[in-house]
Amino acid sequence: MDKLLIFGHQSPDTDAITSAISFSYLQNQLGKVTEPVALGEATDETQYALDYFSTKAPRVVDTVAEEAEEVMLVDHNEAQQSASDIDKVKVVAVVDHHRIANFQTADPVYYRAEPVGCTNTIILKLFKEHNVEVPKDIAGLMLSAIISDTLLLKSPTCTEEDEKAAKELADLAGVDLEKYGKELLKAGTNTSDKNADQ
Amino acid sequence: MDKLLIFGHQSPDTDAITSAISFSYLQNQLGKVTEPVALGEATDETQYALDYFSTKAPRVVDTVAEEAEEVMLVDHNEAQQSASDIDKVKVVAVVDHHRIANFQTADPVYYRAEPVGCTNTIILKLFKEHNVEVPKDIAGLMLSAIISDTLLLKSPTCTEEDEKAAKELADLAGVDLEKYGKELLKAGTNTSDKNADQ
Ligand SMILES: [Mn+2]
Ligand SMILES: [Mn+2]
Ligand SMILES: [Mn+2]
Ligand SMILES: [Mn+2]
């Protein structure tokens, strides 16, 4: 079986990078062979989370068609936010929390979108649906994404589900939600490309 | 709260009509106020299933914007297969098993697509995820859709999940899968618009 690549949007934020990591881990547990990659370098905020939870940043790629026939998208669906050669590969799955636009497939696809504050809130549900345990470090990365996307549960896009997921993931990760959340957001204050909506 | 309309594609097949009924039932159990409608008359096959499971055919409509601001789509997503004024309403949810094309939203949306043989196979998973019991007659209608879309589990689009769902729904509906399946498909042999792929 050829390896599938999984990636978030260009100019990746913490959700884009960590949802590739968490969804790839889940897919591999389910028997697929996948690798999380990123369409750009980690921001200071994301790097703080990666360091805190002892995880290497995903390999950065610009194009994907040379090394994979099939891909899975996380935290985005629009072609102009994706790999520059996205039209040359088959998208077999999408997990996202944004509007749907500029996206189409030739064949039936797995598409999971919910109007919540963070892609990792949806991915936590997928772990549960498949009865896969979330390892401690992955839980910490998923938590970091929710903190980032919802500005520590304070953004207007934050839902009850995000809040519940954040609390559960903080327990799994063994961190204090408020304390770690403030540290993480502080680590990101040097980056200029933060966007609570992405 | 305004009533939401839920409907399948134009020239509705058994899945289009019964997935509107089953998904509307589920949404109403979850506290929404929804009504299943249809973008065309039931075929002989669908009518056989509706009669067998003592269910009235959904009201037939051509347009939806005059009576609803928000809608949910089942068994389709492409605008040209939908209500003629679909661009005038907000699509808040989609459950489907087809390719995605000619579909876009202005806002985040609930979208649930899986590459299985029938929309009702996905809807059965949703009942389970929300811990809602499937009533006997609804189970029979959902089963009818799987039989119809997969030609009694024989089409190339049929997956293991469809097969498992069909067996479970036959038990819930209290019918013999093979016997009822043959009767249903026979009832539909007079219709000219059958399409295993829809
Ligand atoms: Mn996000
Ligand atoms: Mn993002
Ligand atoms: Mn169908
Ligand atoms: Mn159909």
Image: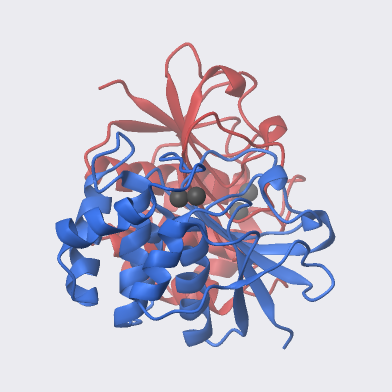
Chain colours: A blue, B red
Residue reaching furthest to the top: B66
Give the left or right position of residue A152, taking residue A45 as reference: left
Q: Is residue B179 above or below residue B71?
A: below
Tell which of A134 and A153 is nearer to you.
A153
Residue A153 is situated, as x and y percent measured from the top left of the image, at 24, 46
Q: In this view, does A53 lie above or below B6?
A: below
- Please identify the quarter of the rendering in which residue A67 is found: bottom right
Tell which of A105 and A149 is nearer to you.
A149
Quadrant location of the N terminus of chain A? bottom right
Residue A20 is situated, as x and y percent measured from the top left of the image, at 53, 67
Q: Does residue B54 appear in the picture of this structure?
A: no
Tell which of B59 and B54 is nearer to you.
B59
Residue reaching furthest to the front: A190
Give the left or right position of residue B84, taking residue A186 as reference: right
Tell which of A95 and A51 is nearer to you.
A51
For image coordinates 51% across by 59% down, the residue present is B144
Residue A174 is situated, as x and y percent measured from the top left of the image, at 18, 76
Q: In this view, does A60 lie above or below B145?
A: below
For image coordinates 34% across by 38% down, the residue present is A157
**Tally of marks:** 0
Q: Is residue A91 above or below residue A105?
A: below
Q: Does residue B79 appear in the picture of this structure?
A: yes
Residue B187 is situated, as x and y percent measured from the top left of the image, at 62, 55
